[in-house]
Amino acid sequence: MGARRTRRTRPLAGEPDNGVSRHQELELAVHQAVASVDDPEYPGVSIVDLGLLEAIEIDESGAVAIGLVPTFSGCPALAVIAADVSQAVDAVEGVRTTSVTWLTSPAWTVERISHDARQQLASEFTVAVEIGRRAPSCPRCGAPTVEQSLFGPSRCRSVHRCSSCHETVEVMRS
């Protein structure tokens, strides 16, 4: 899952505007740098796979603007994620400056989470992803879960219990 939109302003200074340009290479390198940043709550799960990356904009001078969508506006990890993204992008050759902005639109939803991230959340963190109104399956045994509390460890998660193995399951929700 990549950025939802990227906007090319103009070619970098001195580059021809044909084929794969230095600008496009820089954009790819910046995207890869952002994809290397893991969510602090889920080590090994990229913020790109969680659907937080919305936009990458690079101007002709190498100034990079990253637009991220928070899972919710009060998430305590926002400052850490922004700092990690800035550090990763600043390390890319050709980047002059980096700014990270938390966008208010579009709203983040669990539909933005990639299939691979859903599998990784289930297998490594016992976290299920609730799509729609149907109760998610237990990441351990696949049986249906029953909501125990709408309120989990953060605003974007609730707590369920497996109806078969009785495992407590965190559920990411929109």
Image (spheres, rainbow, N blue to C red):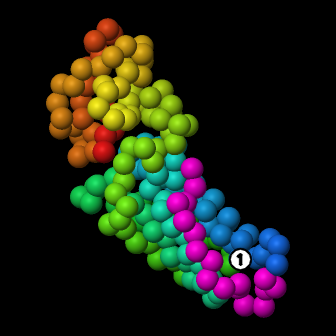
Query: Bounds of the magenta span?
Result: 1-17
Q: Position of residue 32 (x, y in %)?
A: 63, 59
Left or right of 51, for residue 57: right
Residue 13, given in percent of the width and then of the height, sits at 72, 90
Q: Which residue is disc 1 drawn over? A: 23
Is the residue 151 above or below the residue 123 in the image? below
Residue 128, x across and y down, in percent:
38, 30
The amino acid at mark 1 is: His
Q: Is residue 53 magenta?
A: no
> Where, by quadrant of the figure, is residue 145 drawn?
top left
- From where the camera sits, is residue 159 visible? yes
When the figure is inspected, residue 121 is found, relative to residue 160, above or below; the finding is: below
Q: Which residue, as the protein is rendered here, is positioned at the far top?
A: 164
Residue shown at 52% from the left, 42% from the top: 114
Q: Residue at x 42, y 44 (%)?
A: 111
Q: Indicate the quadrant containing the C terminus: top left, top right, bottom left or bottom right.
A: top left
Tell me if mark 1 has few (under 14), some (14-19) or many (20+) residues whose alpha carbon lies within 10 angstroms of its own. many
Q: Secondary structure at mark 1?
A: helix
Q: Quick check: 109 left or right of 30?
A: left
The residue positioned 23% from the left and 46% from the top of the image is 155
Q: Which residue shows up at 61% across the image and 62% down it?
A: 31
* Secondary structure, magenta segment, majority class: loop
